[in-house]
Image (tube, helix red, strand yellow):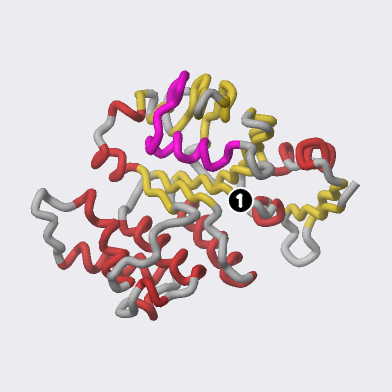
Amino acid sequence: MSGGLATQGLVVEVDGTRILHGIDLAVPSTGLTALVGPNGSGKSTLLRQLTGVESPTAGAVLLDGGDLHALGRRERARRIAVVEQEAASELALTCLEVALLGRMPHQGLLGSTSREDRRVAEDALERAGASAWADRSFASLSGGERQRVRLAAALAQEPSILVLDEPTNHLDVRASLETIALLRSLADDGVTVIAALHDLTLAGWADHVALLADGRLAAAGPVAEVLTAERIAAVYDVRAHVGPDPLTGRLAVTVALP
């Protein structure tokens, strides 16, 4: 596991309860990786480990072969950007000011905003589909609109790795598809993208999938190899059908109760 983002024997315990059990995962440096699994399978916990927000009970998180936690917060923020599922929404800031928060890891000690910082933030808002709200209060936006602005702030960091926890949460159907398309375009531009997703059909737009079950890595690899009907049925306790979507040709998942 030399290079990129990886975990090695990762164990996480909270109040004596083991949440993650010896996870060995190498996140592909190219393409979009979807992290999927039932509620309570450990997806959000694993993402917090991958970003260095929390330290493991045992094992390690590696970045380019070195201990991620050995890096300072500013250096980690230059390399890894995070879009959380829930974040403070009552910020007394405009959307452009929120996007500019993503420039902080690149600014000096005084934190002054340069013309280049503003250009990058404005471009990030445009790419996230949020430029129309640049001068609006962040707190006045809907949940889906705020999600797009948080994504813009992450893009403004100009990271080499982008980690997202349920990036389509609160978004309608079109906005969800636009977000997945944006993540794919970032991956095509060389950004390592890993996103936790609930919707298995949206996960079908990824290049790679890591499937968690009960805090363990059930499978990881190319989408078609991981998201099989048999494996989905076993992990989610449902009946499942997997096949090409008639509109897109990509993998689509249909499920029903047993």
Q: Which of 160 and 84 is in front in this view?
A: 84
Percent x, y of residue 134: 33, 76
Inspect the image, locate mark 1, and give the three-letter code of the amino acid beneath it.
Answer: Leu
Q: In this view, does 154 lie above or below 140?
A: above
Q: What element carries label 1?
A: loop
Query: Quadrant location of residue 149?
Result: bottom left
Q: Is residue 257 left or right of residue 193?
A: right
Percent x, y of residue 221: 65, 35
Percent x, y of residue 178: 55, 67
Q: Give the range drawn in magenta.
A: 42-60
> In the rendered image, which residue does mark 1 sit on?
197
Point out the residue furthest to the left here: 110
Percent x, y of residue 154: 37, 56
Q: In this view, does 32 lie to the left or right of 149?
A: right
Taking the spot 66% from the left edge, 37% from the top edge, the residue there is 211
Magenta span includes 3: no
